[in-house]
């Protein structure tokens, strides 16, 4: 059981490729990799993050999450790849910007 836990650390190489690493390498870099992209549209925040661990299964891994935080609540979408997560991030921001005629701030 401890081996499985110790073996569940991942690093985002070149901003795209998820690679399994040991806990020491993971700890050295996860802080700088956690937030992939954040965008504010009006009073709504869209945030895409890298977990650094597999939150799915071995056959269907989940490494990324795009979340929407607003006064109406929170919605989360989980993804295997950074490309899929960022595509959803852009899609949500575009839709919110068009719907609300509000400017966006990327961070």
Image (cartoon, rainbow, N blue to C red):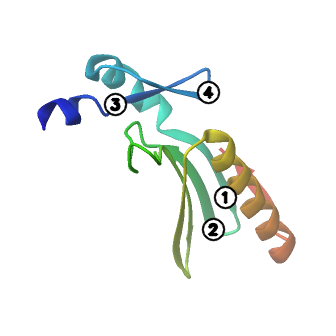
Element at label 3: loop
Label 4 – label 2 distance at C-alpha: 25 Å
* Image coords of residue 11 (percent x, y): 45, 26
- The residue tagged 3 is 9
- The residue tagged 1 is 40
Label 4 close to label 3 by CB (< 8 Å): no
* Image coords of residue 62 (percent x, y): 47, 48
Is 100 situated left or right of 70 in this image? right
Tell me what residue is drawn at x 55 percent, y 45 percent. 80
Label 3 close to label 1 by CB (< 8 Å): no
Q: Quadrant of residue 43?
A: bottom right
* Image coords of residue 69 (percent x, y): 54, 67
Element at label 1: strand
Task: Identify the residue at the far left of this view.
Answer: 2
Task: Identify the residue at the far bottom of this view.
Answer: 72
- The residue tagged 4 is 15
Label 1 close to label 2 by CB (< 8 Å): yes
Q: Quadrant of residue 51?
A: top left
Of circles 4 and 3, the one toward us is 3
- The residue tagged 2 is 44
Label 4 – label 3 distance at C-alpha: 16 Å
Label 4 close to label 2 by CB (< 8 Å): no
């Amino acid at each position: 059981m401890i081996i499985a836990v110790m073996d569940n650390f991942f690093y985002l190489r070149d901003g795209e490729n998820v690679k399994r690493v040991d806990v020491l390498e993971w700890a050295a870099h996860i802080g700088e990799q956690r937030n992939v992209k954040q965008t504010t549209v009006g009073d709504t925040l869209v945030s895409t993050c890298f977990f650094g661990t597999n939150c799915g299964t071995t056959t269907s891994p989940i490494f990324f999450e795009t979340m929407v935080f607003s006064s109406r609540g929170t919605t989360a979408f989980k993804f295997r790849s950074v490309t899929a997560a960022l595509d959803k991030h852009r899609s949500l921001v575009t839709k919110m910007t068009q719907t609300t005629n509000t400017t966006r701030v990327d961070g």
